[in-house]
Image: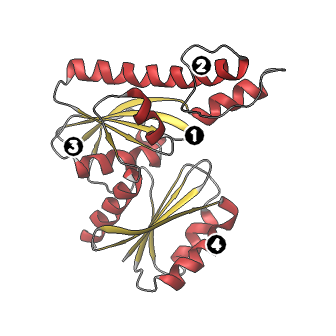
Amino acid sequence: MNLIVDVGNTRAKYSVFSNGEEIYATTSAHDSSALKIDRLFSDYPQIQKAIVSSVRKDTAELVMLLNNKISTIELDHSTPIPLKIGYKTPDTLGADRIATAIGANKLFPDEELLVIDMGTAITIDYIGRKGEFLGGNISPGVSLRFNSLNQLTHKLPLEKLEEETPAIGQATAEAIRGGVQEGIKNEILGYIHNFMKVNPAGLTILTGGDAIFFAKIIKYPIFVVCNLAMIGLHTILEYNAEDD
């Protein structure tokens, strides 16, 4: 039984895997990680190995806590992984992007893949059919766009996603939501369109907290795998266990 911890910009996610399957998943605020870890070990005393992925710099205490309990891997650019990295600066490649790429390659091997992770930031990454991370782009996610409009202007209110938002706003709130939602929708569609022109048989995978919302409104044949990073992290953990 394995514990997977993915520390994101906004929250930390935890999954327990048994026999290759995710049997439990939860989230918490960053300041309650220690309590969450203790509860997980109480509920699942069979946990033997763990892996931690983080986009933050303040996870040393969490990793130490886990290392005091069980063998723990902290994912970074030097961790052995079952994927070739074709990236000029692998030491700057985010653990979240590595994890989602490996998760996608695990679920869809031997395919050309476009992976769009819709979290605090939106990452757009490409995986070749021979199992190589080819690179990608990063842009602001939903919350960053809404917050920047609110915080960096004097009068614009803070809005949030809403499915019934018209494409053309007729009030300021609608205009903000439409600008953010239509902008992201068209951004995603642009990436998919360009990807499919080059790879007609390629597959597109959406993941991350806002994936389901945008999968509904872009109306395009895609796969939605919300726990893609956790699958990828578990794959890395098992890959390193084989080398022990």
Distance from disc 1 to disc 2, alpha carbons, whole Å, reads 17 Å
Q: Earlier in the sequence, mark 1 or mark 3?
A: 1
Which is more toward the observer, 204 or 109?
Answer: 204
Which is more toward the observer, 154 or 31?
Answer: 154
Q: Quadrant of residue 124?
A: top left
For marks 3 and 2, give the one nearer the viewer.
2
Q: Is residue 193 left or right of residue 158?
A: left
Q: Earlier in the sequence, mark 4 or mark 1?
A: 4
User: Which residue occupies 15% across, 42% down?
Assistant: 110
For marks 4 and 3, give the one nearer the viewer.
4
For marks 4 and 1, give the one nearer the viewer.
1
Q: Quadrant of residue 126?
A: top left
Instruction: Give the SS element for disc 2.
Output: helix
Q: Which residue is mark 4?
A: 34
Q: Amino acid at mark 1?
A: Thr
Q: Position of residue 62 (x, y in %)?
A: 60, 67
Q: Which residue is mark 1?
A: 120
Q: Amino acid at mark 4?
A: Ala
What's the image's color scheme? Answer: secondary structure
Q: Earlier in the sequence, mark 1 or mark 2?
A: 1
Q: Which residue is mark 2?
A: 179
Task: Give the crowd class for mark 1: few <14, some 14-19, many >=20 residues within 10 Å.
Answer: some
Q: Quadrant of residue 163?
A: top right
Q: Position of residue 135 (x, y in %)?
A: 36, 32
